[in-house]
Image: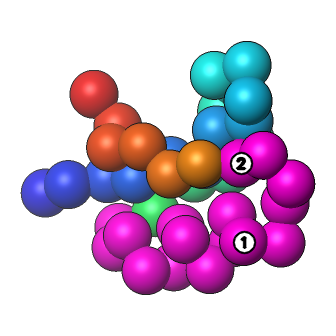
Amino acid sequence: MQEWIVVDQFGNQIAGPFFDKQSAEFFAKNIPNASVERKK
């Protein structure tokens, strides 16, 4: 099962984990400089 997290520009996790990438991207688009990464 893949999990996705939202991280800020410094690489700190600010949201998640999400179980699908679309919901993580939807969350991230409201935050400047945020990106979605696969949780390791």
Magenta-colored stretch includes residue 11: no
Element marked by disc 1: loop
Residue 1 in the image: state x and y as whole percent. 13, 57
Residue 24 in the image: state x and y as whole percent. 53, 67
Q: Residue at x 72, y 71 (%)?
A: 29
Count the marks: 2
Residue 31 in the image: state x and y as whole percent. 84, 60
Pick the front one: 16 or 7: 7
Q: Is residue 17 above or below residue 19?
A: above
Q: How is the image coloured?
A: rainbow
Question: First in sequence: mark 1 or mark 2?
Answer: 1
Please give left or right for residue 27 compared with residue 21 in the image. Answer: right
Q: Give yes or no for contact between labels 1 and 2 (Cβ–Cβ under 8 Å).
A: yes
Pick the front one: 35 or 18: 35
Magenta-colored stretch includes residue 23: yes
Residue 15 in the image: state x and y as whole percent. 68, 50
**Amino acid at circle 2:** Ala
Return the mark for residue 17: none
Q: Is residue 4 above or below residue 24?
A: above
Q: In the image, which residues are magenta? A: 19-34
Determine if residue 39 is in view: yes
**Amino acid at circle 1:** Lys
Return the mark for residue 29: 1
Return the mark for residue 34: 2
Q: Is residue 14 above or below residue 29?
A: above
Element marked by disc 2: loop
